[in-house]
Image (cartoon, rainbow, N blue to C red):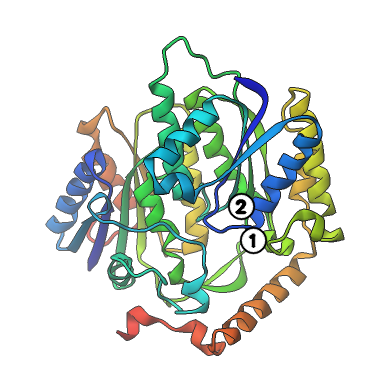
Amino acid sequence: MNQKRVLLLIGSPRTAGNSESLGDGLGDNLKNLGWTVEKIRIPGPLRSPAEMDSLTSKMLDSGLFILSSPLYADGVPAMVLRAFEEIKRAKEALPPERDLKGVRMTAIFNCGFPESHHNDVALKICRLFAADVGFHWVGGLGLGMGEVLGRRPLAEAGRVARPVGRALALAAEALDQGKDIPPEAVELMAKPLIPRFLYVLMGNRGWKKQAEKNDLTAEDLYRRPFLEE
Amino acid sequence: MKALILSDGGDASAAADLLLEVLQKRGWECETLRLDAMSLRYCSGCFGCWLRTPGHCAQRDELAAVLKAEVRSDLLACVSPIRWGSYSVEMKKFIERSIPLLLPFFETFRGEVHHEMRYPRRPIFLAVGISSGVGEDESVFRELVARNLLNFRSPSAATVVLDGNRPAEHQDLILKGLKEAGVEGLL
């Protein structure tokens, strides 16, 4: 096991989305501290057993497993749960003397709701998974208003993303020193990026604008197909 | 009164059979579906169900028939094994792909921002989790269901956790859950 090696799992089916920006943000901070980071996007391992085997073996050989994921229906996405099942199976196939306490695990969840606490249950699920597999859970981070990041690298997200960048830097520093994710990082990540009323206003306008691009009117968005058919 | 009962094989489907028996005895019309026998795809996070084909998932598989049955039901029961406090993979796929039942627009509900409902009425919700009796699995599962209810807003609901090692208790606990959810014929 390489203590300064990270396996970064992006738990989103989208490429270059906010989960990837956040995961890369933490990964880049760790790289600057001398760590090696390998990134895997979740759809890959679900496509083929060989890619899943590669994910599980790399994970069991890493010193740190980072999951960066969107919140799906208040919890861990089904795709990620599937990977968790495979990791558990791979762990069970190891010799009984193989202790995975040296593998640490953290997670970053982001959601489209303004309040960051929507992510709390997903982080608890990750903690229970880590305990079951034998990883050492070091805490996690939850971000609300994820859409504000605009699906671009954090460095391009401007001033609004500064607390996020600072939270990730603090988290990386702690992880490098063998410590848990510090409360300061958790608080910074949970901080609203913009006022809640503004986020709701922009969000509701944004949905209508996106619908127009798809040749739909605002009224079309309210269709009830299962009552109409 | 119509009930849609979804389960995910094994102990979950055995518990779903008990639920079916209880409801049928009280005159409910029930449809049962085993998600482990279906091939539901994963949610791709595309928002097509909100912005391209409103109310319909852009991926065309068996999901549409399940959602249509849900919209026309008075009770939705999801019976799933509990893994790390979560639903099973197949049940979670279904829950995630239920977002066509919501609108993209935000509103405040119980002090938090959530999405508006697409349909005027929602079925009563019964979540049944099969636990292996491990640590915090049950309490986290209950929290997860409570969070889901804030987003999918059933008029009433209950969460039942069954110990997979004590099947003799299952029927009584299911009955208790149905009563707690306010299911007609059981009050």
In which image quadrant can residue A168 be found?
A: top right
Residue A161 picture location, percent across and down? 81, 56
- Disc 1 residue type? Phe
Q: Please, which residue is most extreme toward the front here?
A: A50
Determine whether A183 is above or below B77 in the image: above
Which residue does the numbered mark 2 point to in the structure image? A118
In the image: residue A153, left or right of residue A103: right
Label 1: chain letter? A
Residue B134 picture location, percent across and down? 42, 27
Residue B43 picture location, percent across and down? 44, 60
- Disc 2 residue type? His
Label 2: chain letter? A
Number of residues whose C-alpha sits closer than 10 Å to that of mark 2, classed few (under 14), some (14–19) or many (20 or more): many
Quick one: A13 or A123, which is closer to the camera? A13
- The residue shown at (64%, 83%) is A209
Which residue does the numbered mark 1 point to in the structure image? A113
- Does any portion of residue B104 appear in the rendered image? yes
